[in-house]
Each structure stands twice: as C-alpha cells, then as structure tokens.
Image (cartoon, grey):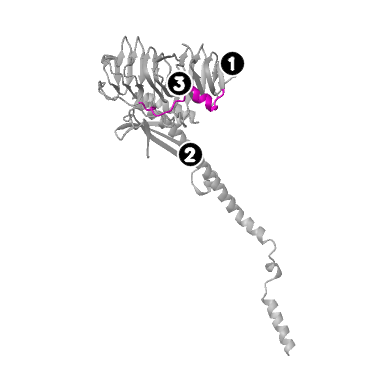
Amino acid sequence: MTRILDKTISRRSRAARPPRFLRDEKGGVAMMTALISPVLIGLVGLAVEVGSWQSDRQRLQSAVDAAAYAGSVELGLVDDEDQARNVAYAAAMLNGMAAAEIDVAFEDIEDYRAIRVTTNRLENRFFTRLYSDTDKVELVATAAAFFNPASVGSCVLILGENGAGLKLGGSSRLDTTGCSIHSNQTGPQSFDAGGSSRAVAECLSTVGGVNASLQRLTLNTCEGYEENADPIADPYAGVTIPTAAEILADGSYQNRGQGDYFSSTTPVQSGYYTDLIIQDTTSFVDGATVIIDGGGLHLKGNNTLTGTNVTIILLNGAVIQTGSQFNMQLSAKTSGPYAGMLIIGDRDPAIENHGIVGGATSQLTGAIYLPTGALKLNGGSHADIGCTHFITHSLNVVGNASLRNVCGGVGTRSIGSENPAEVKFVQS
C-alpha cells in the first residue's frame, strides 16, 4: 500500500513540473542581451550626441566671448560701433566662426555702452530624433561685455623732476587712448606740444606746466589737463637692478662678450654682453634675459627682432638704438622679479640717450623702464590693443606712436591707479 502511494505522489510531482524545455536556462543571457541591447545602444548614442552638442556649444561660447571681449575694448577706446562690430567679426572668425553666424548688438549696461554677441547654430539630430518631432537642435551662445576705462592709470610716466619732461615736436602724434599721461617734471614745459603735433589720452597731468594749446590735445575722459598735480611714484622703485659685478660673480649668465648676430637662423641667447648688434632678422630665445654692459642694443637695417618672455637689462650707460626701418615684436616676462618689464635701464645718475625708431609693425608688450634715460621715440610701438608703458626720465616724441593699457596677465604695474583697465562680462 505504501509503495503504491509513493508511486502516486511521484507521478503527481512529475505532472506538476513544467516541461523540460521550459525549465532549460540555456540561452537566457543571450535573450536578455538581445532585449536590452537596443536600449543600451540608444542610451549610449543619446549620451554621445548630447555630449557632442555640449562640446560644440562650448566652442561657440568661447568664440562669442572672444568676439565680445575684442569688440568691447574697441568700443570703449574709439566709441565707434561700426568699428567695434568689425573687430568682433574678426575675432569670431579667428575662432572658427563665419561673420554671418553671429549677431552683434549694442546696449547700455551700468552706464557703459556694451556689446552683445550672439550665435544660433542648428545641428542635426540622430538618436534623439526618436524622442523629438524635429530633426534639428538649436545651440545658442551669447556674451555681453563692456570696457571700463574710468579706472585707467597712465601708460606714460616722466620721472625726471629736472629733466626735459615730455616733448612732442613737428607733426608727431602720441596716441594713448585708454590710458593717461603724467609728467613729474617741475618746470613750465613739463608737457610741451609744439609745431603741428597732437596727443590723444584719457587725461593729462603734470607737476609743472603744460605748454600746448587745447587744439593739440584730445582728452577722452578729463575735461581739461591738470597742472601743478601731485607727482606719481615710480611703480618699479622697489625692483632691484643687478650690477655687472654681481652678474659676473653669480655665474648664472654666460659671458658672451660682444655679440654680433647676422643670421635669421641664429637666435639671441640669454647671457651677459658688452655690446649687442642685430643687423638681420632674428629672434631672442624664448624666456631670454639679456644683460648689456656699457655698450648697447643696436638694431640696424630693414629687419625684425622678435621674442616672447624677454627681459633686456642695460647697465653702465648702455643704450638702445634702432634704425628707421627696424621692427620689434617683443613681449616681457609675465612672472618673476622682472614681471612686465621688457627693457630695464639702471639708476646710474648719468643720463643715457636712447633712440627707438620703430617700423610699421613694431609692437612692444610690457614696460620700457629707463629711470635715467632720455628717450627719443619715433614710432616704436603701434598698438590698437595691448599693453605698452613708457617710464622714462624724459621723452621726446618726433614720430607717431600708439600705446595701450589693456595689461591683464602681462605683469606690468599700474601707474597712478590701483585699478587697471578692465573688460567686464555681463551675465546674460
């Protein structure tokens, strides 16, 4: 009886089980993969597509940021919307955009005239078309900025109390749009503009007097020039200028004697020179520090001297003299003890006579610091945007030169102002 019951239970148990093919787990993973794969592929495709849009939008934002920055500086300096628009277009094109892709508009923000640059770009949908009724996605980037010149200090400072001051002669033109001019010279011709010369600046101030008619001056910020003003302190007075003996004793700089460079393939090396003559197109080694003792830096012919992160130190009466067609495209170091100082003269009491006669493409970025130097400037720097400061014992301008004071990141020190010129971006 018990055996019959056991057989009966066994038959019922077998009858309750599902068929073997339903109990077989082989191929389950493959089936699950087949079911899930389209979803996973769709999610990956969606992530890649959205990531691509984000990357493209960042590139667009960088382009409109650059366009707004350049356009705002131009607008702040020359107050010409058409010219600012063209500068914005040019900056956008340098960043990979066509002029037709951006829209440039102007608006008043915080009492300033601002420029706004916007772009709208349509890109194709691929995976995301499954979730949208359009086949395009719109990527939008915008940037608005204005240039604040109100806090701009000077980019020309005359240090010599008893020197020749600042003199403009003949038909010369000194354009310091975006920054001011100050002379510590105490005499009645602290600033002297003769002949048909002209000066353009934000403000003009002198410790002594001004010998110039208002027709010779264009002051963008101040209503008139200021005489009998307080002197402005030398911003680099605390910078230690080494002596030749200290340099040679240190041994950090190779003694190269008198250097003559004639080959465009031979760059000028760091080192200590008694004289340095350049009469071919050449360059400084990047980061070079060049010390010239007693002789000078003589630039001759219709050539070009280039260099970045450069410091030139002139000791014991050494001078800089350039030919009439020589071009310089030099920028100062942005960090270290000589940050922002491109050309440095010593503080020897004897006056050195320097002459910069820059060609049409010369651009000097940084401070030309000649505390006991009488500088004759005929051109020397042609800048629509950038950073060029002249801090000299006296300055005689006999040609045309333009200096600018947009010095963020250059390392120069502000002259007569705690706040340098700045571009402010406005939250959209």
Q: Amino acid at mark 2?
A: Gln
- Asked which quadrant contains residue 11, the reply is bottom right
Per the image, the residue denoted by label 1 is 263
Q: CA distance from mark 3 to mark 2?
A: 32 Å
Outermost residue, bottom side = 1
* Mark 3 neighbour density, 10 Å: few (under 14) some (14–19) many (20 or more): many
Please give the residue where the numbered disc 2 appears in the rendered image: 58
Residue range in magenta is 234-254
Q: Is residue 80 visible?
A: no
Amino acid type, residue under disc 3 in the picture: Gln
The disc at residue 363 is 3
- Circle 1: residue type: Ser
The picture places residue 249, in percent across and down from the top left corner, at 53, 26
User: Mark 1: which secondary structure?
Assistant: loop
On screen, residue 197 versus residue 362, left or right, reads: left
Looking at the image, tell me whether mark 3 or mark 2 is earlier in sequence order.
2
Q: Earlier in the sequence, mark 2 or mark 1?
A: 2
Residue 248 is inside the magenta segment: yes
Q: Quadrant of residue 269?
A: top right
Q: Is residue 160 magenta?
A: no
Kind of element beneath mark 3: strand
Pointer 3 and pointer 2: residues touching (CB < 8 Å)?
A: no
What x and y, as percent, mark residue 301?
Answer: 51, 11
